[in-house]
Amino acid sequence: MQLAYLVNQYPAVSHSFVRREILAIEALGHSVSRFSIRAPQRDLPDARDRQEALKTATILSGNSAGLAAAAIQRLLRHPRRVLTAFRQTRSAPGRAGLVRRIAYVAEGIWLGRELERAGVQHLHAHFGTNPAAVARVAHLVSGISYSFTVHGPDEFDEPAHIDLPGKIADASFVVAISDYGRSQLCRWSKLADWHKIVVVRCGLDIDQFDQFAAENENERDLDLCTIARLAPQKGLPILIEALGSLARAGRRPNLTIIGDGPLRDELEAQARNHGVADQVRFLGARDGATVTEVLTRSKIMVLPSFAEGLPVVIMEAYACGTPVATTAIAGIPELVDRSCGWLIPPGSAEALAAAITAGLDSSIAQRQQLSAVGQARVRDLHDVRKNAKQLVGHVEAALQ
């Protein structure tokens, strides 16, 4: 099949799961054209992402004249289709919302034209926000079928505002990455559309991670690690607070944080205020090899999120043989339970400190047993090759 993918920003440090999915689909013999609404992230640390950037067409890249020309041409040839797309595209009220709405339509028209030129049979978008809006317009003006993957939590924060029900109604199928995610999509769609909502979990290249998994637990010289965007939804201030509580009790585990974001300065200041700055290393955004190295050197991966879909980093931690302490929210309990880690209520620094203490007090054999259960689950549920076949099967069914 000739397929296309659309992402709001691709490639990007946080979108490695999209890259793995695309490459797995191509390994099955299909062709995938890559499209990104915004330009790829600058200074990509991973060479694989830099290679993907060379294969990706950007819609908004000094292309305003091209977008306008494509929109006018399509409006003259197929005015009814364009007007339908405009009516069915939602955005915020007011002048700014109108401008955004017009932009979505223009982007979708341009994309639809490019899909036609490339002979694309089906378009798949990642995220139910603006990529799904643009994909929907491309479908309405070109007739090319589309689907999209919803990760959460952003799509579930304002489902009516982004017209999630309408996007689901017009799509051939919609992918949730967890059973929890499917339940939320069902909640915000018509009963008649529930059959379109399927679960295809995010996947890893299992064989690649197997070679990094530490065989000797004694070699783990790091206590804790966190791999996350430094944003409010990740709950990292709770982790710093928990470290401060442990320090006052005379326990000072080290923590390595990989990731960047708007809270970095505040988190660094918070670590100083709690007297744990010397325990916390902020490494910023790093490539996949560094993430894997830190995971395999850490005794526990900690993720105190307030809102999630189902974090890929949890899968990566288990693939590296590292047990996880995280919050019992969204799709996380579908992968993590007491047999492979520590689940805590979100927002509780006290519960997180207790989980960290329990994890670090566990014997090597106990942590190995926990990680072995997690590894088995990841191999069963999150092998990108299996999941790519599953996704391709849904596309084939949609094209019949």
Image (cartoon, grey):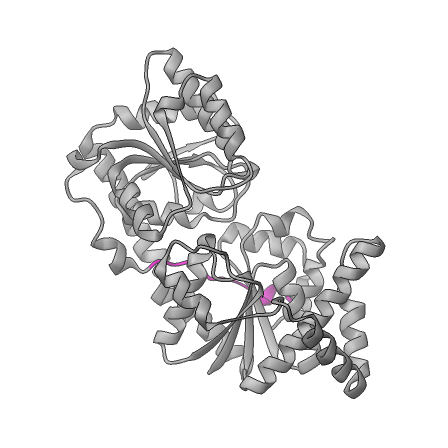
Residue numbers of the magenta segment? 192-204
296 up-or-down from 170: above or below: above
Q: Position of residue 185 (x, y in %)?
A: 61, 56
Residue under the image location 44 percent in, 22 percent down? 242
124 up-or-down from 372: above or below: below
Extreme residue in the top direction = 249
Magenta stretch holds residue 134:
no
Magenta stretch holds residue 202:
yes
The front one of 297 and 357 is 297
Residue under the image location 69 percent in, 60 percent down? 165
The front one of 100 and 246 is 100
Say whether residue 32 is left or right of residue 366: right
Say whether residue 11 is left or right of residue 364: right
The front one of 313 and 169 is 313
Residue 152 visible in rendering: yes
Say whether residue 238 is left or right of residue 62: left
362 up-or-down from 10: above or below: above
Q: Position of residue 386 (x, y in %)?
A: 36, 66
Residue under the image location 53 percent in, 50 percent down? 180
Q: Position of residue 380 (x, y in %)?
A: 32, 57
Q: Quadrant of residue 374?
A: top left
Say whether residue 166 is left or right of residue 273: right
Extreme residue in the right direction = 94
